Image: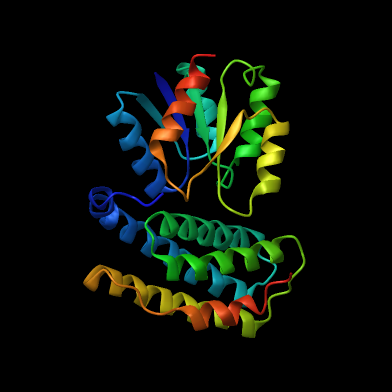
């Protein structure tokens, strides 16, 4: 069920604040993983950040960023259970995607419209095991 | 009605707290399972809304410890889930949770009816 317009307006600033914090957490800890891929704490942090960003974006109906972060969450989960080994190339791709997500938040803030992130989602989706 | 909301995500914590308070519920919050258990020592709620994925102590561990403290049969727990967490929900049920709420698909009226029903059991 969509949020009422009133709730959407009321909670947009909180959404943007927390979403920016999660993207920073994603960027910081993905950078840690590039140097130390075995860092479990960094992996758990990026998984939680992607999960939180996906769910709060979905409830606010920011579906582009919601879809990309949901794919990220799956990827991090796969890595946590040992099904995916992150290469430097994959981690760099995740960092690039975090940057486009950050730009998306600016578009939401400025115009209340999202950028098209479907290419980023499709690119990451190819790494998700079925 | 007293509700303990255990949720690490600031957005959902503030959002659900505000909605529940609009219904005159008394809401306590905790940001992880460890804090949630501490709150139970001083203030017993009628219902607990519990997130699963949290830092320090996740929802599964909090449910496990509530079982060991013989609290799981005394306070009904609803876990927050999202799509794709079906296995997590099943695991939470086995640990004593009474049900789940999909927090991405917001239907507050429905949720509040469930909370009231659980609190009156």
A94 over A39 or under it: above or below:
below
Question: Is A2 left or right of B102, judged from the image as shown?
Answer: left
Query: Which of B78 and A1 lies nearest the eye of the viewer?
Result: A1
Query: Which of A105 and A20 lies nearest the eye of the viewer?
Result: A105
Question: Is B97 left or right of B18, judged from the image as shown?
Answer: right
Q: Give the image location of residue A124, x and y in percent.
A: 60, 78
Question: Is A35 left or right of A10, judged from the image as shown?
Answer: right
Residue B16: quarter of image: top left
Question: Is B113 left or right of A111, judged from the image as shown?
Answer: right
Q: Give the image location of residue B20, x and y in percent.
A: 35, 31
Which residue is depicted at the point 35% across and 77% down? A103
Which residue is depicted at the point 39% across and 60% down? A61
A29 over B105 or under it: above or below:
below
A16 over B119 or under it: above or below:
below
Number of disc labels: 0
Which residue is depicted at the point 45% across and 78% down? A117
A90 over B117 or under it: above or below:
below
Q: Give the image location of residue B102, x and y in percent.
A: 52, 45
Residue A106: quarter of image: bottom left
Q: Which of the image's four quarters has the C terminus of chain A?
A: bottom right
Instruction: Name the outermost residue toward the right.
Output: A83
Q: Give the image location of residue B26, x and y in percent.
A: 35, 23
Image colouring? rainbow
């Amino acid at each position: 069920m969509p949020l009422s317009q009133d709730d959407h307006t009321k909670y947009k600033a909180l959404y943007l604040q927390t979403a920016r914090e999660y993207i920073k957490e994603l960027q910081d800890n993905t950078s840690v993983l590039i140097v130390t891929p075995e860092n479990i704490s960094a992996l758990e942090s990026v998984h939680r950040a992607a999960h939180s960003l996906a769910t709060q974006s979905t409830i606010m109906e920011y579906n582009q960023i919601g879809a990309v972060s949901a794919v990220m969450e799956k990827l991090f989960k796969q890595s946590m259970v040992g099904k995916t080994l992150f290469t430097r190339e994959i981690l760099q791709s995740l960092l690039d995607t975090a940057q486009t997500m950050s730009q998306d938040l600016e578009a939401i803030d400025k115009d209340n419209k999202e950028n098209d992130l479907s290419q980023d989602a499709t690119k990451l989706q190819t790494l998700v095991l079925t | 009605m007293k509700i303990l909301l255990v949720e690490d995500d600031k957005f959902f914590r503030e959002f659900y707290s505000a909605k529940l308070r609009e219904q005159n519920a008394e809401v306590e919050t905790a940001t992880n399972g460890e804090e949630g258990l501490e709150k139970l020592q001083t203030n017993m709620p009628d219902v607990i809304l519990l997130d699963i994925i949290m830092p320090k102590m996740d929802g599964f561990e909090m449910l496990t410890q509530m079982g060991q403290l013989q609290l799981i049969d005394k306070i009904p727990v609803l876990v927050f889930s999202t799509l794709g967490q079906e296995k997590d929900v099943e695991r939470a049920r086995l640990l004593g949770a009474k049900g789940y709420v999909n927090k991405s698909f917001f239907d507050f009226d429905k949720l509040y009816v469930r909370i009231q029903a659980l609190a009156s059991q």
